Every structure is written in structure tokens, then in C-alpha cells.
Amino acid sequence: MKFKIAVLRGDGIGPEITDIAVRVLQAVGRRWDHDFAFTEAHAGGEAWDRYGEHLPAVTLDACRAADAILKGPFGGPTSEINHPKWAGIETTAILGLRRAFDLFMNLRPVVVYPEVVALSPLRPEIVEGADMLIVRELTSGIYFGERGERTVDGERQGFDTESYTEGEIARITHGAFRIARVRRKHVTLVAKSNILDSSRLWRDVMARVAPEYPDVTHDYLHVDNASMQIITNPRQFDVMLTNNMFGDILSDEASVLAGSLGMLGSASLNAGGFGMYEPIHGSAPDIAGQGKANPIAMVLSAAMMLRLSFQLEDEAAAVETAVRAALARGLRTADIAGAGGTLVTTQAMGEAIEAALAG
Ligand code: NAD
Ligand code: MN
């Protein structure tokens, strides 16, 4: 089989970790005789250097011509936020890509493998066996709403708007229930319906959609309570459905269960099943180019691509097993080194995963 993959290596640690994910995919191609064709395209800071914009038309064309997008993180150091190379990059490049392909469904699995239980700052008996999927709405809500600055009573006022249509909520709610069917069949909606009208609409839609999935149970938590339960009783969660901003925040928090942001991959899908795959973390400018980055989040994102875009379940599972094998050998990048083991570079971790995959 031939699969076309657009590769956006990204900024900061992006190139280091993306190169490893590509090598892992090439190893899968060799072992199973698949033809993965990679097309490098540019977005974010690297596109700014080449084209003077963050998301040029040539990049969108390359992504359109592909079967899936593999994306590194974009963005510069917080101290250079106003430099034109970096200013506004979240909206222009990151939200721009999500919008261009209508990637409204963001899947963020949080799996605590037995090999990594000790990596979490939380007690093993709390995190052991946790296996949840955060389903985050990705193309609407406050990150896309009307925003700006105005003058009120002679004072500057900044504002952002949270709004959702029924249709936007319904399509992701259906998505969450469908995925729950092939998991442990439970959906938890997280919102703030005691205050927000938009949250009340999420609950209304949930109540309307849920009866179509009688085999799936569901419940509801306010976001403040949910954020506490994620770290006190994470095993209760199967599928967690939530809006754009809550999903952003809760998934960084949930990454603590798995030990590090550098351990979690994600998939962003549209209604047609087209997907973009990226780690949940950012470009980590503080450690860029030093061989310190954990490539696992990026590699697990590539595994999700195999599973969800190419229906290569065995291959996806083999990549996940290879990651676990590298961890079981005690190999640790700096972000997960706290619990002992052997400190290795980004590249050495990548080679260990490749080696485990070759068998
Ligand atoms: P970040 O996720 O880049 O880093 C937070 C902390 O986690 C840092 O200490 C970093 O060193 C560490 N870290 C992150 N990924 C790691 C990995 N794979 N291995 C080891 N350590 C890792 O978040 P930030 O510092 O808030 O943001 C940095 C830049 O990334 C900003 O410009 C931000 O806008 C951007 N960003 C981009 C995306 C995206 O492209 N989707 C997402 C989030 C942040
Ligand atoms: Mn985030």
C-alpha cells in the first residue's frame, strides 16, 4: 500500500522529534512492506524564514495532496513573542491548519503504561491502569470567537467570546459516543453549566444525542471538579468530552499521569476522517537542539496516524509496543529521568524504538 504523508517539522524541538517519527514510520514500512511517501512542507517559524508567512498556500496544497499530516509543534520562545517571526503564530499557523481542514475532533489519549507508572509525580496506586481519551473540540469556542480590546469607562478592556452552535456540539458529541463504543463505553461531559450558557447547550445536546447510543453510559462533571478528579481518581474516566479551552488545559494536566508532556500524542480529525497528527506539547524552545527532547509523544502521534488514517492497527500497536520496550529497558530522556533509569538523548531513544520495532 502507498500512503502520502505531508511532514511539517515545526520549530524548536520539532525537527528533532519529527525526524524520529519519520524514521519509525520508515521502519514500519520496511517491516510490513508499505510505501510511505513523505512530502516536506513548511509552516510556523520555519515558513516565516522561507516565505515571510506562517501558513503559505504551497503548504496547504501539499497537505491537501497528502493522505495525512504529521506535524511538529510551532512557536518561539516566550521572550520573543512580539518578533514578527513568532507573533500570532498560534492563530495563523496552528489554528489556521485546524480551520483549513475543519479538524474539529481532537483525540488525546492518556495511557499510563505499567513501564511508566513510576514516572508520575502522583502515587502509583492512583495512576496505575489509568486509560482515558480526551475528546476536545478544536475549531470553535473561545479560541475562535470574537475577541479584541476596547475602551470601557476610559479603561482598556480585553475580551474573548465563548460560543458554540448546536451543530458544532452535536458532531463532536456523536464522535465521542462512537469512540466510546470501541472502548469501555462511557462518556463524561466536562463543562461549567452552573455558570455558562454555552455549557448548558452542551448538556442539552448531550441529552439529545446519548439515547442514540444505548450501549454507552454517560455522566457530567463541572470543569473545576473534573480537574481535581483527573489527579485524584483518574481511573474512573474512559472518554472525556469537552470544549476547546477546557480540553487544552485538562490534557496538559492529564499528561502528569503519564509522567510528562513528552509522552502524549494526538490526532485531529475532520468529518471525512482526514487527520493531522501532532504531540500535545509545544516547541519547548528551552531545550531545542540539545538532544534533550522526548520523542515519544511524536512517535505515538505517528502510531495514531497508522491506526486512524491508514487503518493499520497491527502496525500502530507494534509502534506502541516498541515505545514500551524502550521504556522497559530503562531508557529515559531528561523529562522522565526522575525515577531513575539510563539518561539518553532524543536520538538514542529514537534508535531504541526503531530497534524494538525491527524485532
Ligand atoms: P511547551 O509544551 O513547549 O513546554 C512546556 C515545558 O515542557 C517546557 O519545560 C519544555 O521543555 C517541556 N517539554 C515540552 N515538550 C517536551 C518534550 N517532548 N520532551 C521534553 N520536555 C518537553 O509549552 P510552552 O513553553 O508553553 O510553549 C512553547 C512554544 O510552543 C510557544 O511558542 C507555544 O505557543 C508553542 N506551542 C505550540 C503548540 C502546537 O504547535 N500545537 C502547542 C503548545 C504550545
Ligand atoms: Mn496546549
Image (cartoon, rainbow, N blue to C red):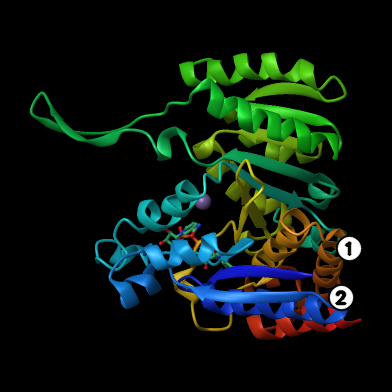
Position of 84 with respect to 125 (left or right) is left
Residue under the image location 80 percent in, 74 percent down: 34
Q: Nearer the viewer, residue 193 or 342?
A: 193
Q: Where in the figure is residue 39, as x and y percent of width and height?
A: 56, 75
Q: Is residue 38 above or below residue 250?
A: below
Amino acid carrying mark 1 in the image = Asp
Looking at marks 1 and 2 on the same chain, the residue that comes earlier in the sequence is marked by: 2
On screen, residue 84 above or below 252? below
Q: Which residue is mark 2?
A: 32
Q: Quadrant of residue 67?
A: bottom right
Circle number at residue 314? 1
Q: Quadrant of residue 84?
A: bottom left
Could you tell me if the residues under marks 1 and 2 are in contact, i.e. CB atoms within 8 Å?
Answer: yes
Q: Secondary structure at mark 1?
A: helix
Q: Inspect this view and state whether residue 41 appears.
A: yes
Q: Residues within 10 Å of mark 1 (few under 14, many from 20)?
A: few
Above or below, 193 against 228 in this view is: above
- In percent of width and height, residue 200 lies at 54, 15
Secondary element at tag 2: helix
Quadrant of residue 338 within the rendered picture: bottom right
- Using the image, determine if residue 359 lies above or below residue 120: below
Which residue does the image show at 77% across and 38% down from the upper left?
179
Question: Which residue in the rendered view is the most extreme toward the left?
Answer: 154
Q: Residue drawn at (84%, 66%), measured in percent from left and top? A: 315
Identify the amino acid type marked 2.
Trp
**Given this view, does label 1 or label 2 mark the residue nearer the observer?**
2
Q: Indicate the position of residue 121 as horizontal and vertical percent values.
A: 69, 55
